[in-house]
Amino acid sequence: MSARLRTPPLTDPDSAAFWEGCAAGVLLGQRCGDCGAWRWPPREHCPRCHAAAPVWERLAGTGRIAGLAVVHRPLDPTIADELPLAVAHIELDGTEAAIVLTSTLGTGDAGRARVGDAVAVGFLPLPDGAALPTFTLIDNPEE
Ligand SMILES: [Zn+2]
């Protein structure tokens, strides 16, 4: 994947634990420590009960494609070797569909991925030690 598609994440105090998990190869989800509601994006207060007691839980790292866009023509020539490129909304398993990540799919999956397909997370390492989550179709043995 080109350097253009490996932009380091912009972290803040609310999302720092998520990105630290990615760097360690673990997908984490935030939920309310009081009412248990899942929170996405991560934030200080619960949108349901307003408690400020977030907790982080390790997720299975699997999910389903809820939405999908496939880029075939490069708007930026620096990503021409990445096409076709799929960007998907992934509903993460175990979060009652409350956590939906926007992420890329693995090379080779763009032409055959469909809404509803099962995917699993992987992590793209960045030079600074961070990592970006990306997903591949579960039934794709070459990814
Ligand atoms: Zn709550």
Image (cartoon, rainbow, N blue to C red):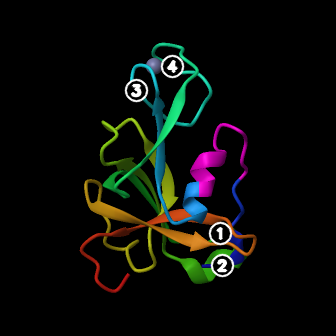
Residue 36 on the magenta segment: no
Say which amino acid is labelled 1. Answer: Leu
> Label 3's element?
loop
Residue stretch rendered in magenta on the structure: 10-20
Give residue 12's quadrant in the image.
Answer: top right
Under 8 Å from ligand 1: the CB of mark 3? Answer: yes
Apparent side of residue 65 relative to residue 135 in the rendered image (left or right)? left
Badge 1 vs badge 4, beta-carbon distance below 8 Å: no
Label 3 environment density (alpha carbons within 10 Å; few <14, some 14–19, many ≥20): some
Q: Quadrant of the C terminus?
A: bottom left
Viewed as shown, does residue 128 lie left or right of 23? right
Q: CA distance from mark 2 to mark 1?
A: 6 Å
Label 4 close to label 3 by CB (< 8 Å): yes
Tell me whether the residue at label 2 lies in contact with that at label 1, contact meaning CB atoms closer than 8 angstroms: yes
- In primary-sequence order, the first of circles 4 and 3 is 3
User: The residue under label 2 is which amino acid type?
Assistant: Ser
- Location of the N terminus (image quadrant): bottom right
Quickly name the residue at label 2.
2
Residue 47: mark in rendering: 4
Residue 5: numbered disc: 1
Furthest toward the top, the residue is: 49
